[in-house]
Amino acid sequence: MYIKHMKIKGYKKFKDFTIDFKEHINVLIGENEAGKSTILEAIDIVLNQKKFNSSSSLEKYFNIENVNQYNLSPSIDTLPKIEIELFFSDEEDLDYEYFNGLHSSSKPVPKNGITFTYKFDENYREILESMFDDSYYEKFIPTDYYMAEWVTFAGRKYINKKSPIKNVLIDNSIRKNNLFDSYSKRIFNNNLEVADRQNLSYQFRKNIQNFIDENEKQLNIKDYNFGIDENKTILDNLLDLKSDGISIQNKGKGKENLIKTEIALEVESDLILLEEPENHLSYINTRKLIKDIGYMCNEAQIIITTHNPLIVSRLDLRNTIWINKGKCNSLSSVPDETADYFMKTDNMQLLNFILAEKVILVEGNSEYILLPQLTKNSLTFTLEGKNIEILSGGGITYKHYIELSKVIRNNLLVITDNDGDLETIESIQELNKGFGNCGNNICIKCSPSIDEFTFEVCLFKKNQSNLKTISDLKPGTKPEYRKVPFDKNLAYMLKNKTEAALRISEEVQYKEVTLLPVYIQEGIEWLIQR
Amino acid sequence: MAHSTIMLAAAGSGKTYYIANHLNPKHKNLVITYTKQNVANLKREIKIIHGEVPKNTQVLTFSSFVYRWLLKPFEPILEFGKRTGMITMGVEITKEPEPQSIKGKPNYKYYKQEDSRHYIYNQKYYASRMTSLVISQSKTIKNIIIERLYKFCDQIYFDELQDFMGKDFDLLLMLIKEKNIKVFAVGDFHQHSVSKSNFTASKPFMKGKIYISKDEYKILFKGKVNIDESTLIKSRRVPEEICKFIYNKLGIDIQSSSIVQGHYELLETNSKIIQVLEDTNIKKLFFRDSRKYSCVPTINWGYSKGDTYQKTCIILTKKFESLFEEDFSCANLTPAQINPLYVAMTRATDELYFIKEKNFKIFKEKYTIL
């Protein structure tokens, strides 16, 4: 059984949120604070009855919009409420009958699942009504009269002992660090049979009792005697996972994460929730981890949150779920070829590309280096100021980015060379027309003139007077490029593309005065209007 | 389409064993019986045969079945009389619903079926009206209920078929009629109307004021099921001698497969009577109030249903005082009178003794607990 679908209402960021999961791998991406961890948390709350079984302050979990609405007009009807529905795959084992029924938002269609609600307890209606009658203007929520409830879609009370999905949550993010106890505990519970666990716990208590019996004299002081606090000697709570005799807590963050994750993957779990597994891991270890995850996913469902582009691309772009502005977007419709391309190329900019609203994709390093400065010189704003991400596509690959852009629906400007080929220019015009017709915010720009076959040529032509001495650094430069005669300075730029670009971006005589070639300027103006 | 099977069995023929043995541990099985006691019996038997209650097998009482499988999952769309959709808090176990009339006079506290309060008290179901609530549902809702049932379950076993009366019997017929649901129900026709608890319904065993025969009972299922009367015809418990005696006296056809020859005897001398009454290896079966007597162990005829003892002694009521006489006939007696004695007579594996009430009377005081 796996989680197919989740609906979150009124919990933290999510006022009304729906997400679909795949049977095997799910990679959650999004900006910081987009709510990726909240999704794992929500699953944990429903399946494992976490958080809401204590009496600690729970107000912080309400959706702020709901709270504001309540504060505007406090009444029983506007009291904020949390509801999380977890839908399981549609399996027909007799046991799963306990989860199947119409007690869900998808009635009248019976589904398998559990609903968690945190809301005001109807039993206290009278008390609350009288409270509101007395012109109740306090700006806090009377959570003392709230109740947390877990009910299966069959309408039966849910207890986590009956969880249909053995799961483990591994949080490698730096924010929390007291997770070891519960982590070791879960590994223990998932890996040992109930009978064995009971036996171990029994043996443990027996031995403690033996210890007390054997040392009765020493533990005695006058009229009193020492016993052992039973609340502190529960085996599950004392367990600590070790490797080669060393607690994994003491093995260094990176190693610790790797071990934790590896163990989780080895454990028989139906569901593995992995929070930022890449933290503290080197590139090599991250790759090792990804390999392990890929190997495991045939048997278990895995839900990962990550900021690592490697994890996103290597675990197949189509498994990515992008959380943005309280909504989720699946990348499952990315074409096979595109997903394959990113899987093979370890593209480190992939996440930036997905997460940015406006992106300029350039062909090479020179554009990448120069565009921010040249934009500042030619236009009244900066790319950074307009939240425009600039990425280097590294050659001919822009078509994969375009395919991806169609799925994530961002605004994409592609700056490319016409390679002196009229056909290229014409085909780009055709492509642009197609984008317009399909409502895609994608635009490809190249110089319309076949003489301007590459960026350096355009740049030189636009800034000829400023660049007329740039080749002085290398006086021996021949005034030709690929056996075609060129101005000596242009020839220098063509032969030393990166060096020239760096110099233009740094040296005083060029830095503030060099301007954008026209086709690029047009492109950027198009982009900022989106 | 005759998927379902009704098996009419003899007392002591091993119905529980048969169900436990018949169920395929690889299939999804629901095993349903009337009492919690029988749930325990069935589970025990299943564990003996399969080592464990198989993963996909559930053994539960009829009322749990109705609540968990037929009502609770559908509450959001269920029709409670005129009211649709209601989330209940479970089953009310202490309070009985107000009857329609009391001693022939209409009861003003009674709620009609179109009122949800007919079925619900304080957000809980009246246990005794759950079945009729299922039956009152529209075709569409019934279909949703049935669909879920056969989605999660391949085979439903009903033990103690003869105890299905009134609306429960209607529900059983409804399930049997469903071509997608495989029902296997087993019971002993001659044990009907012998209940451990009070019951008011007489359907389907009475037509007006007349009890129906076994053949008439079979007709109720006709065309819908296979009726198997041969597999469990022989009693493994009751010895040959006693079977013959039952057939001769009560007209109930029961055969034996027991290797024990068996012995039955009417005790008439005081010394013999005392000897048996004082023997703690012999279970004494009284028509009623067995707990009043000190000649332990004792039990009521009706309560002994399902039990097995090596030796028993039946204290015969006045009606059956002439049981041992040549011209005894039960032609004037109703099944409600005959069946309890039949139950009592079919408990012993070895020896069965009888004491006439008039003979017991002499010792009654001696063995009565004050």
Image (tube, grey):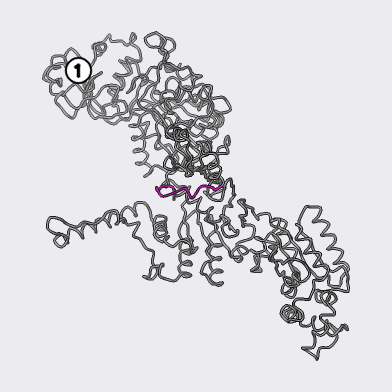
Judge left or right: residue B111 versus residue A5.
left
Q: Quadrant of the C terminus of chain A?
A: bottom right
Q: Nearer the viewer, residue B303 or A523?
A: A523
| Residue hosting label 1 | B355
Main SS, magenta residues: loop
Q: Give how far across and how far down residue B321 sits, in percent.
A: 23, 12
Indicate yes or no whether the magenta region holds residue B37. no
Q: Please say whether residue B208 is visible from this viewpoint.
A: yes
Q: Is A524 above or below relative to A367?
A: above
Measuring 37% from the left and 20% from the top, which residue is drawn there?
Answer: B192
Q: Nearer the viewer, residue A518 or A251?
A: A518
Q: Which stretch appears magenta? A: A52-64
Measuring 79% from the left and 62% from the top, which residue is drawn there?
Answer: A525
Q: How many marks?
A: 1
Q: Is A122 above or below relative to A413?
A: above
Amino acid type at image mark 1:
Ile
Judge left or right: residue B313 versus residue B177.
left
Q: Give how far across and how far down residue A129 sits, in percent.
A: 46, 33
Q: Give how far across and how far down residue B42 sits, in percent.
A: 36, 35
Badge 1 element: strand
- As drawn, the residue found furthest toward the bottom would be A476
